[in-house]
Amino acid sequence: MPVGANDSTLNWKRGVSTVGVQGITARASGGVDEYLAWGAPDYVRLYKYTNDEHYLDIARILLHNTKAMLALPGRTFDLFGPGWQQENWSMGRNRGYGSHRSWLPWISVNHLHGITGIEEFDKDLYQKLSKGN
């Protein structure tokens, strides 16, 4: 994050990993979000159908790292409360800031779909991935 920026004003906080963010547009460089959380079950399927470990690695990133700025009890990142997550941050110009600070219901749906989709497809693999293996 920008040197000298006040962490309390940053939307993406210092020390929070940016592994798992995805570029959201080709129009403006540096715009990222964590929308691809919904795609974790698709990568699990690709892994199961091809046995290519690369797909499992992507599924693991999408399952875990797309929740880096998800507000949890005791770690709300100055959002309204647990379960909230801002989308659309800048990692280019205006690094660390986003376009809004409100809750969007589809963000929660994406996270839940990613989790439950893996569990419904393959419970054993879900257990393995959820433990970080």
Image (spheres, grey):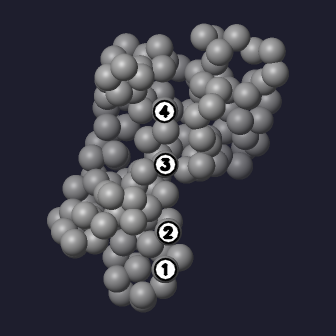
**Distance in Å between CA atoms under marks 2 and 4:** 20 Å
The spot of residue 9 in percent (x, y) is 63, 11
The answer to whether 88 appears left or right of 4 in the picture is left
Residue 63 seen in the figure = yes
Q: Earlier in the sequence, mark 2 or mark 4?
A: 2
Disc 4 packing (10 Å; few <14; some 14–19; many ≥20)? many
Rendered position, 80 above or below 114: above
Give the residue at mark 3.
Answer: 65
Q: How far across and how far down the image is residue 128, in percent?
A: 30, 67
Q: Are marks 3 and 2 in contact (CB under 8 Å)?
A: no
**Image mark for residue 69:** 4
Mark 1: give few (<14), some (14-19) or many (20+) Cα within 10 Å: few
Instruction: Mark 1 or mark 4: name the one nearer the start of the chain.
Output: 1
At label 1, which amino acid type do we have? Glu
Q: Is residue 35 above or below residue 122?
A: above
Q: Are marks 1 and 2 in contact (CB under 8 Å)?
A: yes
Q: Are marks 2 and 4 in contact (CB under 8 Å)?
A: no
Q: CA distance from mark 1 to mark 2?
A: 6 Å
How much space separates mark 4 and mark 3, taking CA atoms?
9 Å
Q: Can residue 39 be spotted in the picture?
A: no
- Between the C-alphas of marks 1 and 4, the distance is 27 Å
Q: CA distance from mark 1 to mark 3?
A: 18 Å
Find disc 2 in the rendering and name its residue. 57
Rendering coords of residue 83 (x, y %):
32, 28
Contact (CB < 8 A) between labels 1 and 3? no
Q: Secondary structure at mark 3?
A: helix
Foreground residue among 10 and 35:
10
**Label 1, on which residue?**
53
Q: Quadrant of the N terminus?
A: top right
Asked which secondary structure carries label 4, the reply is loop
**Amino acid found under the numbered disc labelled 2:** Asp
